[in-house]
Every structure is written in C-alpha cells, then in structure tokens.
Amino acid sequence: MKAPITFAIAGFGDRGSTYASMQKLFPDKMKVAAVADLDPKKVEKAQKLYGIPEENCFSSAEEMLKRERLADVMVVSTMDRQHVGHAIPAMEKGYHILLEKPISPELSKCREILKAEEKYQRKIIVCHVLRYTVFYDTLKDLISQGRIGDVVSICANENVGYWHQAHSFVRGNWRNSRETSPMILQKSCHDMDILTWLMGKKCKSVSSVGGTQLFRKEMAPVGAAPYCLGGCKAKDSCVFDAEKIYVTSPKTGLKSGNSWISSILSVENTLESTYEALKTGPYGRCVYHCDNDVVDHQQTNLLMEDGSTISFTMCAFTENCYRYFKAMGTKGEIEADMRSNLIHIREFGKEEEVIDVRTIASDLKGHGGGDSGIVADFLDMLLSDREETERTTTLVNSMESHFIALAAEESRLKGGAPVELAEFRNRS
C-alpha cells in the first residue's frame, strides 16, 4: 500500500477521536477520510478538524457501511456490543480494521469475527495498546532475557482512580454490563492480555471475586439528591460531586485546564456547556443513584499451565490512575509502575538496577505511548506489507485475554469458583 493510508472513523468518541488525532503525528502516512457518529456535533467537529468531504460524513456506522469502501482502514470505536456487527461488513467491503477493545462480551460473536477474518483475509488489529508501550516492551525484554530466571509469580494492580470510576463506570458509557461489558473485560482485558504476554505462558484456570462495594443506593449519604446540581444536601462533603470532578478539581476540573473528562460531556467543552450537561445529563447524576452494575473492586487469580501464578487486583478506590507490576522469578524480581515510569531490577546477590522509562521513550501520553505506538505499528505493517510479529495484537492473540476475562467474570458470579480454561475455550 502507498502513503498516506486513509482512515474511516466509525464512532468519534474519546477513542475514535484519539486514533484520528494520530494524523497530526503521522501527517505523511495517515489521512482521515470519513467519519460516522450518532452525534451530529461530533461529526461536524471531525469534518472541520480533518477536512473531510461532506459526502463522507455519516450519522451512523450503518449509514457509512452502505457506501462502497471509502478508505483503507476503518477504526471501529463504537460501543462494545456493536464492534463485531460493524467490523464484519467493513471487512467484507475491503477495509482493514483497527478494532477498539473488547472484541465482544459474547464468545459466539468473537468466534464469528474470527471466521470472517479468515474468509476475507483482512488485517485486523485489536487495540490492546499496552503491548506498544516502551514501559511494557522493556519489561518483556528483561523477562525474555532471563534476568530474573523463570517467573514464578506476578502481582499487578490496576488503580482505576475514584474519579475515573465515577466518570466511566458509574455515570458513563461502561456502567452497565448488560449494555456493554463486565468490568474485568471492558477495563481489564488490557491487563489479562499484557500480563500473560509478559509471562509467555498459557492460563490453566482462573478464579475471581469482587463486587460493587460503594456505588449503591443504600450507601447514599443523608440528603443525597438524584442530581448533584439538583439541591443535593450532601454535595459539599461528597468527593464524587460532579461539579468538583468536572469543573473545580485541580486534578480533573475544567477550571484548572484539565479538559479530558469534561470533553466527554459536550463537544464545546466550555464551562457553560459543562454546567448545562451536568443539570440533566448522565454525568451529573448522583453516583449512588445510577443504573450501574459493574464492580468497583475485583481480585482475579490465574493459575498457569506450569504452576506459576498471576494475581491481579482492579480497584476504584485510589487517588491516581496507574498500573503497578511486580514479577518474582527464580533469580530475582522486577518491580515497576506506570506513574513513576521506573523499573527496578533486583537480581539476587547483585546491586539493584533502575531504568527510567522517561529517558528512553519519546511519547508517554495516551496509555503511556501505546495509543500512538499501535497506530505507528499498524501503519508500518500496511506500508511495508509485512506480517504480524509476536507482539501484534491480532484477533487470535487477543482472544486469550477475552477467554480469561470472561471466565473470571463467570467465576466471580459463582462466588469465586475456579473455571478451567481448556473447557471454557471450547464452549460453543
């Protein structure tokens, strides 16, 4: 294929707009040529940002897919349960696919798209972006080199952040597993993918426990109202108050210049439009009076085929959003976190070595550089016509994380009973 590779964006929300924005990083290799979104304001914004012709702007992915192929690649960043239904007809029309995770919360749909990929012979990459970060790439190299011997156990934490949980998983799009996916799949299939990739071993069985500890009606403080701006008497003392999170917080508030989460509320992303959205929109609701059902904490344990283990904790109740990692091997240990971007290597009987990822990475924005990393790798694959590598997040590679995550959710719903992966993978 020749540059620039053209992209059609199906779903111009946070993720779709992020991948579209990579045109600024790779202006000679990439061009956004078409867009579809249910919100006409988002379509208009994309059209202005990327100079998209009027005839290539659509009110839905379905409308876009009625046309003949408009680009080389389609970014499928619609809602979780729509991914397969949009990706398969796109492949049929000749698009290569950059598919936002998860593939689907339904195993039958995952198998359906695997068959379609084989039939249409398109390149389809799942957005498990952590594999494309310098942070995890360095960890993979250290483990593969045998610096700490054979890895016996990994413990890892996904610190979601109290405000991020409230935004995305209580008030926001991914609050309800019936509409989207269970938390362990939607948020943490990243972790199931990266941890097993780092260890280089297959999972034998998985067990998981967790639930919704806080974000329930019975936990609401006295005087709580359905909306934070609707006369709530608990507003001043509530850390989840929507005005604090979206407007006044030094960390996340629009008044402090932190516009990521407020930009989800309105295309204009002004104080006026944010306040208007908070009055009656979903992001202004009391966190104790939403229709959420996904967990706010979950502990998942993986037993690998050789007897080694992975222990993973996802928890909402943290100040900051970042991932922590520790691998313990027969010759040493590695400890690292994505907040400090420091990797500590402690080989038994030797001086500790510290790698500062900030000194070797050119981009740490957007999942630690993973957002730009996956697009750069995909562009290189298409322009050079090269095959996938061991790192590439193909459908087949990504399915393992889905098997583990969905088995973990089954275990959680059964009170932590172990689920055997060999049996789970073969279910119809």
Image (cartoon, rainbow, N blue to C red):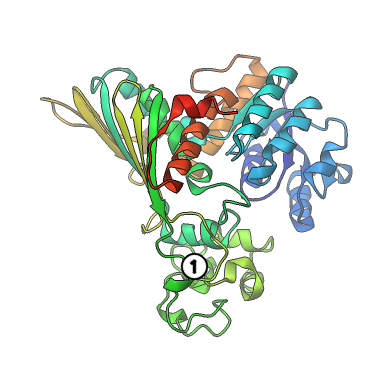
State which quarter of the image contains the N terminus: top right
Tell me residue 371's x, y (percent): 55, 38
Most foreground residue, 295 or 349: 295
Say which residue appears at 76% left-offset and 58% top-offset: 41
Q: Where is residue 309 in the image (x, y as percent from the top left)?
A: 30, 31
Which is nearer the eye, 203 or 16?
Answer: 203
Residue ID at (61%, 38%): 106
Total number of numbered labels? 1
Query: Whole-percent x and y of residue 222?
Result: 43, 82
Q: Decide if residue 395 is in sight here.
A: yes
Q: Is residue 407 above or below residue 382?
A: below
Q: Mark 1 points at which residue?
A: 245
Which SS class for mark 1? helix
Asked where in the image residue 110 lies, by quadrant, the reply is top right
Q: Nearer the viewer, residue 318 or 381?
A: 318
Image: 262 above or below 189:
below
- Which residue appears at 87% of the width and 31% of the height? 68
Name the residue: 19% across, 26% down. 332
The answer to whether 74 is drawn above or below residue 18 in the figure is above
Q: Check the picture and name the quadrant holding the C terminus.
A: top right
Circle 1: is it few (<14), some (14-19), or many (20+) Cα within 10 Å? Answer: many
Res 298 visible: no
